[in-house]
Structure formats: structure tokens, C-alpha cells
Image (cartoon, helix red, strand yellow):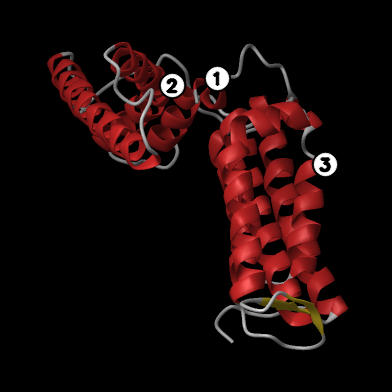
Amino acid sequence: MRQVLSLHGSTALLTRANPLAKSAAVVFITAVLALSIDWVSASTALLGELALFRLAGLTLRLLWQRGWPLILAAAGGGWSTAVLSADSGRILLDAGIWSISQGSLELGLGFMLRGLAIALAATLLMSCTDPTDLANALAQKARLPHRFVLGTLAAMRLVGLMAEEWQTIGMARRARGIGSHGSPLQRLRAMLGQSYGLLVQAVRRASRLAVTMEARGFGGARRSWARESTFSRLDVWVVLGGALIAAAALAAAVAAGTWHPVLA
């Protein structure tokens, strides 16, 4: 998880854009994806996002490393939607207890591609955005309360620590013979116990961090900034790029006749 929030000295073009501009572009794309569940608009948005890979300094390998839980969740959601949806059109597969028709397959494919497109947009944003720059933009440009911004920054910085804490707790429990053997039910109970231990550690760490930040004057009425958050011509192109991908996805779905609003 630490890799998701670390730029590793990247000099990619999108890393130089203002975080608010990149967030606005992601909002445009996800808004269109949230309006319809057809596969044409989702695949168009997905192709547009893949075209931004080089601009964000990413590769397919890095995408898998940073977003594999979301990718697997989208694939599983698409499969379950195709299997559990009501049959419509020609039956493609009939396994007795469940079947897949042409309509349910298109619905499952649209659900999967939409999930992948949303996950990819979030991964692109997090991979090319420094948490400190995001906090500066939220406080200086969006004028959000300082305490909320600093709390968000602290939470983002602690994500990587929580991943390491999970591994540490797991190794400590296995050294005591917990979770390393037994039936699947026993392993499940051990994992739940490990999750509870991580929750306790997270609450303790957050409490200490809150007290420390309060003691050092964070969230005060007046403060200075080590880095000024500014907008440039690049930010305009980033926002326009997100709007262009969203418009292309919408136009492609309408032209193909697959546009299917969620609330319809």
C-alpha cells in the first residue's frame, strides 16, 4: 500500500499537475460511469485512461501491483452479475442452477468494465499525486478546514504503515502458532483476530498522532505554507482531458445504442 502513495521521484507529466485539477478530471470520468452500466461507455473510458499511463509514469505491472484488489473485485462483480441477472435474449450457457444469456452477459461485462475504469481512475490519481501536495491544494485552493485537511494527510501517510503493521502482527501471531495451521474456520478466526489487533494499533497510533499535532499547533487560525499550491496551463489541459474522455464515453454509448441509465 505504501507504493500507492509514493511517487518514488517520478518526473512524469501528470505528477506536476495540481491535485485539484486531477481530482476534477477523475470526477468527470466517474460521473459518466456512474450514470450508465453499458459496456461501450465503460470500455471507451477505460481506453482513454490507459492512454494516460505514460503521462502518469505507470506500467501495466505497476497497475497490477497497486490495484489488484480492485481489479479482482471488479472481475468478481461482473461474473456474479452475469450469473445472477435475469435472462434476456439468447441463452449462451445453461448449467442447470444458473445460466448466462446475451443480456445478462452484456450487463455483467458492463459492470466489470465500469468497475475497472473507476478503479483505474482512482489508481492513476493516487499514483501521480503526492499526499502533501493534495493537502496543500485542499487547504489553500479549496479552503477546507485545516484540521480536516491535516487529518486526511495523516491518514494517507499512515496507509503504508498499516500495511507493514499487518505483516508484523501476522508474523508475531504465527510465531506463537496462531493462524499458521488448523481448519479453514480456525484460520478465518485467526485472521479476524489479526484484523482486530490492527484496528487497535490504528486507533492508538491515530490518538498519539492527534495529540502530537495538537501540541505542535496544527489546525491553528493562522499558518504559513512551505509549498504554495498553484494552477498552471497544464492543469487546464488535465481538466479538459478528463472532460474529453467523459464526453467520448457518453457519445460512444449513445451512438452505439447501448446507453442504459442506472435510474431508468
Q: Secondary structure at mark 1?
A: loop
Image quadrant in which you'd find residue 157: top left
Is 53 drawn above or below residue 117 in the view shown? above
| Contact check, label 2 and label 3, Cβ < 8 Å | no
Coordinates of residue 51 in the picture (x, y in percent): 83, 41
User: Is residue 36 in view from this perspective?
Assistant: no
Which of pointers 1 and 2 indicates the residue nearer the eye? 2
Q: Secondary structure at mark 3?
A: loop
The answer to whether residue 134 is left or right of residue 68 is: left
Task: Find the distance from the CA under tag 1 to the CA under tag 3.
Answer: 21 Å
Q: Which residue is mark 2?
A: 160
Task: Find the distance from the CA under tag 1 to the CA under tag 2.
Answer: 9 Å
Q: Which residue is mark 3?
A: 51
From the viewer's side, name the closer residue of 219 and 123. 123
Coordinates of residue 254 in the picture (x, y in percent): 80, 78
Is 79 drawn above or below residue 133 in the view shown? below
Mark 2: give few (<14), some (14-19) or many (20+) Cα within 10 Å: some
Instruction: Please state which amino acid type lies under the numbered disc 2.
Output: Gly
Image quadrant in which you'd find residue 146: top left
Identify the disc placed on residue 6: 1
Instruction: Please state which amino acid type lies under the numbered disc 3.
Output: Ala
| Contact check, label 1 and label 2, Cβ < 8 Å | yes
Is 126 drawn above or below residue 76 in the view shown? above
User: Is residue 31 in view from this perspective?
Assistant: yes
Task: Find the distance from the CA under tag 2 to the CA under tag 3.
Answer: 28 Å
The answer to whether residue 237 is left or right of residue 215 is: right
Quadrant of the rendering where the C terminus is positioned:
bottom right
Coordinates of residue 93 in the picture (x, y in percent): 78, 75
Mark 3: give few (<14), some (14-19) or many (20+) Cα within 10 Å: few
Which residue: 77% across, 32% down? 60
Instruction: Please state which amino acid type lies under the numbered disc 1.
Output: Ser
